[in-house]
Amino acid sequence: MKKIFLILFLLISKKSLCQSISGFISDSAGEKIPFTNVYLKNTKIGISSDNTGFYELKNIPKGNYTLIVSLVGYQLKSIKINIKNDENITQNFILNETDSLEEIVISGSLRPVSKMESPVPVEIYSNTFFKKNPTPSVFESLQNVNGIRPQLNCNVCNTGDIHINGLEGPYTFVLIDGMPIVSGLSTVYGLTGIPQALIERVEIVKGPGSTLYGSEAIGGIINIITKRPGNSPKLTSDSFVSSWGEINTDIGLRYKISEKTEALLGVNYFNFQQRIDNNKDNFTDLTLQNRISVFNKINFERKNNKLFTIAGRFVYEDRWGGEMDWQREFRGSDIKYGESIYTNRWETFGTYELPTSENISFQFSTNGHFQDSFYGTDTYDASQFIAFGQLVYNKQSGEKNNLLLGLAYRYTFYDDNTFATLDENGNINKPSKIHLPGIFLQDEIKLNNQNTLLLGTRWDYNSVHGSIFSPRINYKWHSKEQTDIFRLSIGNGFRVANIFTEDHAALTGAREVVFEDELKPETSWNANLNYVKKINTENSFITLDASAFYTYFDNRILPDYETDSNKIIYANLNGFSVSKGISLNADVLFINGLTINLGGTLMGVSVTENNQTTKQLLTESFSGVYSISYKFWNDFSIDYTGNVFGPMRLPLLGENDVRPEFSPWYSIQNIQLSKKFGNNWELYGGIKNLLDFTPPKNSINGANNPFDIGIDPEKNPELAFDPSYVYASNQGIRGFIGLRYTVF
């Protein structure tokens, strides 16, 4: 009898959990959309649609739920669903494409929330956005994002960094899947070689993020989110060539290691070996490069949907620029001038959710960077190793509070062959070793249905500089219809500088490098107002996103090129620096297939010292971006993208330097045509830099005498060799053609 009751009980229990929701997900044209995220809000029940667009959620307990469907590049959709006993629900969805994304984001608060609900303003750019202007690296792709400018730091080797709202690259914190992979030496190289076939989206936070991410997150955050193996096609291939001779190939491959282990392999290869000198200065207009990057990401299926993912990347690059007849055997000599850089870099990072009933995860990343380089006759050999780990505990406390507690630790080892790593007497090599433990606490408080308050604080202990405290506060309000969103952010950031790893000019040997005093950590305070307005009409979807920002710097470290034209003087600013401005983004999606994205940023970045205020070097007062796309009914589309930059103050070699002190207004414009053939093939091609804009031909000062033979730079600094006067690429107009192939 007991067995009968047990069997009946099991049957009843099983029957009470047999409820399911299933259906198909399509776009507005009726085509099925694969790999779409479908989940029940505030539960761990979720799945991705298969390659036919079909999804099915099984074993759902009875109750009331919110079913959410989201995919980068499409508007998020959600509906209320009531699950009753023994009920199987069929629910189909039609998603509308958009560039104003409502995807789940993590960069603002270290936990997954929808973009609309995030109290921190986060900008999201999908893989589709970057396909409108295909480039061989994420570094170049970001040129079409409002308020962001890829800055070249050298006319010869073409290394560069990312400026956010006028702040230089060392103030930008770069992550992959939420893990820090760039700091110090890798700042100028970490955004190259990431296979773009594996990128799902890029999240950008403008303003300090040190409360969550620590040092370097002082000007902004760029978080590159890669695809999950389960959400990826079986095979992706994307290759293009340009009329300049550039060759770029991205390959992505999804494969299974075991029944419960899926992996994603990505390979990027870029090659450019043409010696081009259109400006006739006897120097290569574009650095010759040979780069390969291999990326592998593994997801392990675990009980209770607990996450365990680990990824790794290796990058090798050989790049050089210089005089047109430079040869490899001249490396490091004064026969011909060349800048040659060999880079080996590896990274590994991942997340492991602990097998507990509480939401506790361990996140980790390590990277090693090794550089063997010559700048003319000056050698720069450097190695860097960074290990990072943090334990994060996320707890919903009642209905109003969501707590986040974290313990973090970072170890940084850096060594090079310059006096930057010598001991106090300048005799014995002494590599830099920095320990940075920290603790952070965040409480996201839901005041009511329309108001959210986020409070955060962080304490770090730098083994060299001591304690550093970083608080922040964020407030969000949205209207009942969720068509108006207002956000206020106030926060603190800090950064410990390493000059030689961040400033190319300090490596070229063109000027003497001088440190006036022991450098102290930089600190900043930032305030940001953000307003989002959504307007839906019968024929269009419009999103307006406006921001006003103000950042005040203390102890800022800026290279002084002007006190002595033969020196670069580094010291903490005896005064203050301010970055302020306003920006506006407008995204318009018409149901007829036309999409328009416009953005502009008006800003001023100034330095005040000894009661004198000057405009910061290499900082534009205005920048704008635009993208106009139209999709025709026969899978044919056209994309017109571009940007425009206002004048920047440039570094001169004294008052007798004949080069202009300010750059001109300039615009880089591109056009692309693409055609899909079925679900697998896509052919695309177009023209880059339609206006054929390039900087002045005399940008490299003293190009005819790069070793300063017969010149006394003390008496005639304006005659010295100087490749640091650069604000845009020397690469002019060019055509390109490419082919994409996808197997779902």
Image (tube, helix red, strand yellow):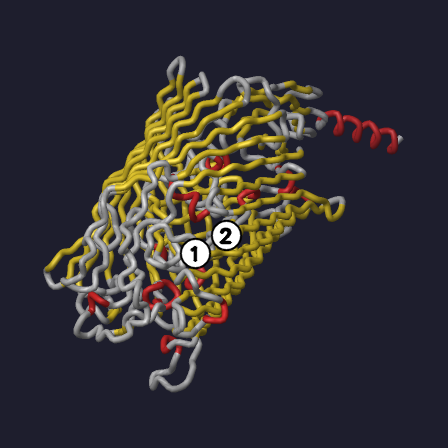
List the residue tagged with mark 1. 287
Quarter occupied by residue 91: top right
Is the residue 708 above or below the residue 659 in the image?
below
* Numbered disc 1: secondary structure: loop
Quadrant of the image occupied by residue 415: bottom left
Is residue 113 something one can see in this rendering? no
User: Residue 470's spot in the image, x, y percent?
Assistant: 34, 56
Q: For the residue carrying disc 1, how many other residues have a C-alpha within 10 Å: few (<14), some (14-19), or many (20+)?
A: many
Residue type indicated by callout 2: Phe
- Give how far across and how far down residue 553 sits, in percent: 24, 57
Mark found first going from the N terminus, 2 or 1: 2
Label 2 with label 1: CB-CB less than 8 Å: yes
Q: Which residue is at a point 66% across and 29% down the rendered structure image?
A: 51
Q: Position of residue 575 (x, y in %)?
A: 17, 62
In the foreground, 243 or 154: 243
In the image, what residue occupies the spot 34% across and 83% down?
Answer: 424
Instruction: List the residue tagged with mark 2.
Output: 272
Relative to 537, 233 lies left or right: right
Q: CA distance from mark 2 to mark 1?
A: 8 Å
